[in-house]
């Protein structure tokens, strides 16, 4: 009863305890790895903090990188509520961005507000359809959604490269193939007084909305029943297929929105910069947050900070910019291992309460 009265933030905090401990252990392992390479782990930790959180500039860089991670993490977390492990958010991101760029260019003469709304909705629609396809393959053909969503990502990237480097290529883009620009008037600006685009706000709103949907609605209750025991859900008369497809579509819409915002707020067109691995980093964020929509927000900020610090490590210590990816990989492996520990400690917490 106490946990029910404490509100949603306590649930999010409890979900983070063991993953954060696993992340701390990953920092120790990463430090040992750096020490083996002749680097000072304490200096590396200090530079990571300096590059991610030590100044207003660092915070803005971190939050800008966290914005797409919030949305791509939802692409993993929402289908997981129905018991599916979808890892194809990267495909939804690139296709959502591509379609948003096409719509933005085609409607470039219309009112900017309408163009921006059309780009966002188009990106969400395409991303939702793409991830729902993986859910449909699981429900109607028995295809493992983890494999199908990953393969669909390769298909999406191939389609993206084909159109950007072929039929939709802007003739003026020489060294970096891209689609025609959407125009400055159709760009989504930054938050007032900050160098952070509105994608972060979209992600926060999406996370809160999905938390309310999953925790406090009949749909969310039914979805969690499907995730816990699909057979029992069918015996109870729940529309399992519809629930699964809806969860996948919502997750894909979040990832598609991330792609659309990257085009409309950062790049101004669809180009290779859109294939930045946001969908894969979102998997790490979702697992650390234990698929909790509210917990995704602080975790995305943390992972975004790690990503933002890569340049600092490169400049100061001449380490590869991808060094922080090693840290993310170690963290992901330890967090996966912590799932077993979470299951063992849960009964002890219940008895203690």
Image: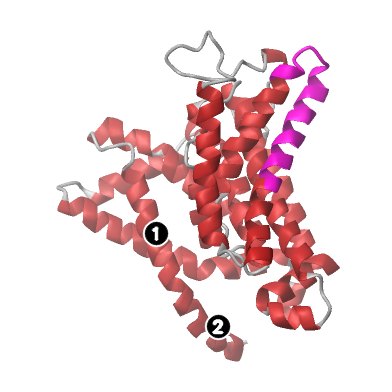
Observer-nearest of 303 and 78: 78
| Residue 86 in picture, x, y percent from top left | 57, 58
Most distant residue in the front direction: 141
Observer able to see residue 193? no
| Residue 326 in picture, x, y percent from top left | 33, 50
Observer-nearest of 261 and 8: 261
Q: Is disc 2 placed on a helix, strand or loop?
A: helix
According to the image, label 2 marks what residue?
A: 346
Q: Residue at x 51, y 52 (%)?
A: 150
According to the image, label 1 marks what residue?
A: 331
Secondary structure mostly seen in magenta is helix
Observer able to see residue 213? yes
Q: Is disc 1 placed on a helix, strand or loop?
A: helix
- Say left or right for 332 vs 214: left
Give the class, few, some or many, for how many residues have Cα within 10 Å of label 1's Cα (few <14, many ≥20): many
Q: Is residue 115 magenta?
A: yes
């Amino acid at each position: 009863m106490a946990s029910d009265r404490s509100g949603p933030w306590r649930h999010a905090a409890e979900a983070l305890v063991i993953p954060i401990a696993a992340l701390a252990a990953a920092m120790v392992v990463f430090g040992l790895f750096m020490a083996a390479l002749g680097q000072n782990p304490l200096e590396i930790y200090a530079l990571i903090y300096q590059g991610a959180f030590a100044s207003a500039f660092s915070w803005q860089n971190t939050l800008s990188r966290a914005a797409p991670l919030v949305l791509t993490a939802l692409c993993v977390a929402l289908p997981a509520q129905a018991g599916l492990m979808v890892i194809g958010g990267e495909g939804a991101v690139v296709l959502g961005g591509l379609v948003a760029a096409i719509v933005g260019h085609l409607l470039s003469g219309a009112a900017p507000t309408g163009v921006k709304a059309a780009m966002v909705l188009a990106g969400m629609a395409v991303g939702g359809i793409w991830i729902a396809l993986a859910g449909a393959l699981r429900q109607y053909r028995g295809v493992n959604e983890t494999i199908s969503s990953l393969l669909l990502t390769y298909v999406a990237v191939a389609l993206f490269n084909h159109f950007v480097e072929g039929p939709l290529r802007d003739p003026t883009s020489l060294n970096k193939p891209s689609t025609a620009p959407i125009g400055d008037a159709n760009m989504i600006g930054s938050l007032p007084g900050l160098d952070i685009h509105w994608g972060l706000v979209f992600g926060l709103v999406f996370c809160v909305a999905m938390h309310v949907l999953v925790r406090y609605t009949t749909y969310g209750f039914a979805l969690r029943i499907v995730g816990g025991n699909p057979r029992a859900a069918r015996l109870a008369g729940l529309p399992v297929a519809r629930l699964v497809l809806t969860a996948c579509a919502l997750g894909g819409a979040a990832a598609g929105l991330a792609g659309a915002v990257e085009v409309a707020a950062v790049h101004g067109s669809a180009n290779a910069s859109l294939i930045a691995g946001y969908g894969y980093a979102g998997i790490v964020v979702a697992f650390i947050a234990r698929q909790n929509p509210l917990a995704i927000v602080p975790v995305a900020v943390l992972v975004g900070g790690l990503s933002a610090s890569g340049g600092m490590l490169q400049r100061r210590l001449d380490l590869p910019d991808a060094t922080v990816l090693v840290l993310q990989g170690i963290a992901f492996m330890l967090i996966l291992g912590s799932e077993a520990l979470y299951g063992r400690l849960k009964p002890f917490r219940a008895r203690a309460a």
